[in-house]
Amino acid sequence: MPAFPSVEWFQSAADLLNKSDSFKRLGTCDAEVGVRVGDQFFELDFDAFEVRSVKAIDAHRAEEVDFTLVQSPEAWRAMIEDIKANGHATHDFTLNSLDLRSDEELARGKDYHRRDAFYRFNQTFQDYFDMSGKFETTFQAGPG
């Protein structure tokens, strides 16, 4: 049971996405995606037909990726619990809905053209997070 957030958790979702038919259905995806959960940062490298790597990064590197998905730990947990309960994100918890409903954008980045990858490859990123419904997740306690 990988804990969220951790490299192990993000890698578990990547492994499942890489084995799925998502890329076959949706096409290639090329993006360096940051994920911020509290004061922790992770990078997901989508390269053509796979998630090539997952790693912990620092705040400086998070500013260099195409965009970074930013939510509070509580909001990430609510999204992941919704996915687990329903097998996929329901309307209020899709990346697109979270982005539209947020006072601040979910996908943040300095360069709009690079940040546009969030919108171009949105369904692939959604499929990635939906993979978390296929494994048990524990949640790290305390601030993060």
Image (spheres, helix red, strand yellow):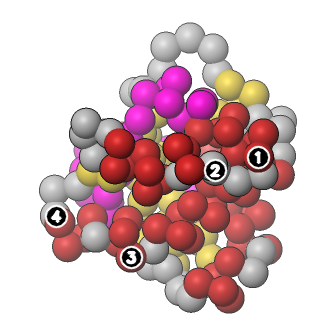
Mark 4 Cα shell of 10 Å, populated few (<14), some (14-19), many (≥20)? few
Mark 4 element type: loop
Mark 3 Cα shell of 10 Å, populated few (<14), some (14-19), many (≥20)? few
Q: Which mark is residue 89?
A: 2
Is residue 140 shown to the viewer in this render? yes
Is residue 62 shown to the viewer in this render? no
Q: Determine the CA span between mark 2 and mark 1.
A: 7 Å
Q: What's the residue type where badge 2 is placed? A: Ala
Residue at the image point whose x is 56% and y is 11% from the top: 142
Residue at the image point whose x is 64% and y is 21% from the top: 140
Residue 52 lies within the magenta run: no
Q: Which mark is residue 120?
A: 3
Q: Which mark is residue 86?
A: 1
The mark lying in front, picked from 4 and 3, is 3
Instruction: Compare marks 4 and 3 and give the one earlier in the sequence.
Output: 4
Instruction: Compare marks 3 and 2 and give the one earlier in the sequence.
Output: 2
Residue 66 lies within the magenta run: yes
The mark lying in front, picked from 4 and 1, is 1
Which image quadrant for residue 139?
A: top right
Q: What's the residue type where badge 4 is placed? A: Asp
Q: Determine the CA span between mark 1 and mark 3.
A: 25 Å
Q: What's the residue type where badge 3 is placed? A: Arg
- The answer to whether the residues at label 2 and label 1 have Cβ atoms under 8 Å apart is yes
Q: Which residues are magenta?
A: 53-78
